[in-house]
Image (cartoon, rainbow, N blue to C red):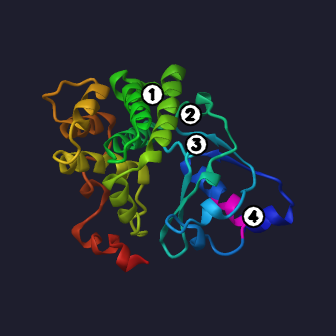
């Protein structure tokens, strides 16, 4: 419907105003309105977006500090069949991003906590990615430092009118998206799989926060020196387990402690298998 309206009105560009889902939706409209075929043809791994020509100009105005979609080269769209389609390509980066922290003021505390931890998850996963990109890792560490070590995540939740904290978290969210150009990891893989069960209507950013602690345990013996860098960025000593630290932080933020608290049961696991949902 949106694509039809776009074409019938002769629109020359698209403007996204809202959270990450709104920005991703605008990206999908910009792609579909200027390209032939189905969106499935442009999903990540097929090189469709990368080679499919120029998209209509897109201006992104985020109202949450989480996905950083306004500067990322990706988009996630839930299709009618329940599939979470991943679009990726340089052309999906917004022509202009207007990041105004005043638009994130007075978010409900739970939403501010979940979106803030989503930004932190992007930074943590980018840091742990095995791809070699020192500059992206430095950006990721700076995002973690802003959100956790400097305490701006907690401040933004405790006082929705704290403009400085909101600004710092918006910067951290943008940095997270810039950093994960080098890759994400198991947190997002599991989060997308859980989201496949549409009966649960799970909140993506909350899933990321909950799964992060578990993946940190799993990755402990596989990322070399990066946990030392992670602890330094979070401002905790080398003797502290980062997974335990994130678990306690989630509790302090008022987020669920486990998937069970999000009504994900053992019977939900087969539904999270991509082979059974596509």
Residue 274: x percent and y percent?
37, 73
Q: Write down the region rendered in magenta.
A: 28-35
Label 2, on which residue?
A: 104
Q: Farthest residue to the front: give it.
A: 132
**What whole-number distance in Å separates the C-alpha atoms at marks 2 and 4?**
31 Å
In magenta segment, residue 31: yes
- SS under mark 3: loop
In magenta segment, residue 74: no
Q: Is residue 263 above or below residue 58?
A: below
Q: Earlier in the sequence, mark 3 or mark 2?
A: 3
Label 4, on which residue?
A: 34
- SS under mark 2: helix
- SS under mark 1: helix
Q: Residue at x 38, y 40 (%)?
A: 117
**What whole-number distance in Å separates the C-alpha atoms at marks 3 and 2?**
17 Å
Q: Farthest residue to the left: give it.
A: 239
The answer to which image quadrant residue 123 occupies is top left
The answer to which image quadrant residue 275 occupies is bottom left
**What whole-number distance in Å separates the C-alpha atoms at marks 4 and 3?**
20 Å
Residue 135: x percent and y percent?
44, 34
Q: Residue at x 68, y 75 (%)?
A: 37
* Label 1 vs label 3, nearer the camera: 3
Label 1, on which residue?
A: 156
């Amino acid at each position: 419907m949106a694509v039809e309206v776009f074409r019938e009105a002769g629109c020359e560009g698209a403007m996204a105003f809202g959270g990450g889902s709104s920005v991703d939706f605008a990206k999908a409209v910009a792609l579909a309105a200027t390209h032939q075929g189905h969106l499935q043809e442009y999903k990540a791994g097929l090189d469709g977006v990368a080679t499919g020509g120029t998209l209509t100009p897109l201006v992104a105005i985020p109202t949450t500090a989480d996905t950083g979609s306004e500067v990322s080269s990706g988009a996630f769209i839930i299709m009618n069949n329940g599939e979470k389609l991943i679009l990726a390509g340089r052309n999906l980066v917004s022509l202009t991003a207007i990041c105004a922290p005043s638009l994130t003021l007075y978010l409900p505390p739970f939403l501010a906590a979940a979106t803030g931890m989503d930004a932190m998850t992007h930074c943590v996963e980018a840091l742990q990615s095995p791809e070699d990109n020192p500059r992206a890792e430095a950006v990721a560490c700076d995002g973690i430092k802003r959100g956790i070590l400097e305490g701006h995540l907690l401040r933004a939740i405790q006082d929705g009118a704290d403009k400085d904290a909101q600004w710092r978290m918006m910067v951290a969210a943008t940095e997270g998206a810039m950093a994960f150009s080098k890759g994400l990891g198991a947190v997002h893989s599991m989060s997308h799989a859980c989201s496949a069960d549409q009966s649960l209507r799970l909140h993506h950013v909350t899933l990321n926060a909950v799964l992060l602690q578990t993946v940190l345990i799993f990755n402990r013996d596989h990322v070399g020196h990066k946990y030392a860098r992670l602890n330094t960025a979070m401002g905790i000593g080398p003797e502290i387990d980062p997974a335990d630290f994130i678990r306690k932080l989630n509790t302090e933020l008022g987020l669920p402690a486990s998937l069970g608290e999000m009504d994900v049961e053992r019977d939900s696991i087969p539904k999270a298998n991509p082979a059974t949902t596509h």
